[in-house]
């Protein structure tokens, strides 16, 4: 007969929970991680956490289901805040207890536990494609999300390339060809004769001379003023009123007006982790 833990002793002597081998709350959710890497819910199985040590985790189930060795089991328990929190064990062995229930012994391990052990799974920028990726397969994170083991969390909203969802850089540029090689043409207005022309027309060996009325040594403020002209593109020679924000994708080199960028919500996944060691007598 397996030795009784202090929790079992306490449960055995308790009049209120005679059917429970444990002083811990019952398991509220049980899933098996099968060989084909699919997590499936085990229907209507009552189970309890009976013992936790730094090495082993022992569970008991009121069931005849056989849990194959080396498979993984994910179980949930309801926390005080009402949230179901999860832990994963790698099944080392199982046996039938003297009371006819199935005991499963395992240790904390597995890909789900790896995911549970991180407080947040946020997308990172892949240095090769310049797109946002997750360290774990997103399909698995989404599957865990569907099962309630992790929850989705909104992190940020970013502008990405409309072609490949890569991260762009932005610069002011020509609205016709996207080139950043633009200039603002400055004009001079000569008050006395009313002539307006490019600065280059007035410059003459370091002196400012009106090309129309030939007045020399004009003084800014007193004789003339500078006026902003149009922006001009060195590459396509088009004139325009204002440069536009131009995106350039770091992933696929696509250049596009910024308003054509796709808005992408950066979502993270927050695991609902069960602190299993809190049930260990050593803690
Ligand atoms: Zn241009
Ligand atoms: Zn003039
Ligand atoms: Zn792109």
Image: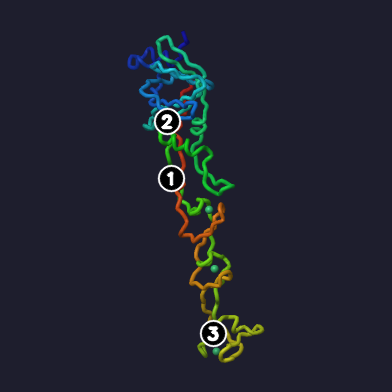
Q: Which residue is mark 2?
A: 85
Marks 1/2: CA distance?
20 Å
Q: Secondary structure at mark 3?
A: strand
User: Closer to the camera, 146 or 122?
Assistant: 146
Instruction: Give the residue at x 51% y 51%.
Output: 164
Q: Which residue is mark 1?
A: 154
Query: Quick check: can you spot residue 236?
Result: yes
Q: Is residue 76 above or below residue 218?
A: above
Q: Is residue 158 left or right of residue 16?
A: right
- Say whether marks 1 and 2 touch (CB < 8 Å): no
User: Closer to the camera, 25 or 103?
Assistant: 103
Q: Who comes first in sequence, dot 2 or dot 3?
A: 2
Image quarter where ligand 2 lies: bottom right
Mark 3 or 1, which is nearer the eye? 1
Outermost residue to the right = 205
- Say whether marks 3 and 1 touch (CB < 8 Å): no
Q: Is residue 103 above or below residue 84?
A: above
Marks 3/1: CA distance?
56 Å
Instruction: Give the residue at x 58% y 67%.
Output: 181
Marks 2/3: CA distance?
76 Å
Question: For disc 3, does the CB lie below 8 Å from ligand 2?
Answer: no
Q: Secondary structure at mark 2?
A: strand
Q: Is residue 226 left or right of residue 11?
A: right
User: Closer to the camera, 89 or 225?
Assistant: 89
Query: Quick check: can you spot residue 282?
Result: no
Query: Dot 2, how many residues are within 10 Å of its Cα: few (below 14), some (14-19), or many (20+)?
Result: many
Instruction: Give the residue at x 56% y 53%.
Output: 252
Q: Secondary structure at mark 1?
A: strand
Give residue 256's position: percent from left, percent from top. 51, 60
Q: Which residue is mark 3?
A: 224
Outermost residue to the left = 16
């Amino acid at each position: 007969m397996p030795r009784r833990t202090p929790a079992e002793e306490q449960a055995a002597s308790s009049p209120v929970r005679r059917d429970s081998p444990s002083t811990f709350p019952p398991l509220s959710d049980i899933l098996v991680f099968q060989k084909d890497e699919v997590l499936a819910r085990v229907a209507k199985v009552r189970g309890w956490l009976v013992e936790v040590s730094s090495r082993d985790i022992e569970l008991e189930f009121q069931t005849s289901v056989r849990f194959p060795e080396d498979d993984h089991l994910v179980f949930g328990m309801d926390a005080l805040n009402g949230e179901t929190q999860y832990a994963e064990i790698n099944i080392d062995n199982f046996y039938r207890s003297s009371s006819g229930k199935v005991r499963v012994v395992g240790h904390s391990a597995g890909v789900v536990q790896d995911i549970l052990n991180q407080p947040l799974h946020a997308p990172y920028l892949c240095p090769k494609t310049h797109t946002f990726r997750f360290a774990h397969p997103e399909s698995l994170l989404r599957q865990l999300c569907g099962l309630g083991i992790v929850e989705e969390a909104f992190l940020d909203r970013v502008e990405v390339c409309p072609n490949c969802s890569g991260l762009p850089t932005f610069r002011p540029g020509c609205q016709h060809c996207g080139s950043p090689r633009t200039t603002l043409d400055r004009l001079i207005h000569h008050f006395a004769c009313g002539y307006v022309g490019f600065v280059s027309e007035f410059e003459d060996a370091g002196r400012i001379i009106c090309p129309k009325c030939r007045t020399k040594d004009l003084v800014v403020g007193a004789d003339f003023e500078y006026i902003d002209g149009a922006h001009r593109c060195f590459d396509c020679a088009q004139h325009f009123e204002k440069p536009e924000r131009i995106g350039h994708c770091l992933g696929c080199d696509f250049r596009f007006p910024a308003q054509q960028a796709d808005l992408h919500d950066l979502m993270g996944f927050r695991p609902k982790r069960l602190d299993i060691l809190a049930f260990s007598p050593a803690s």
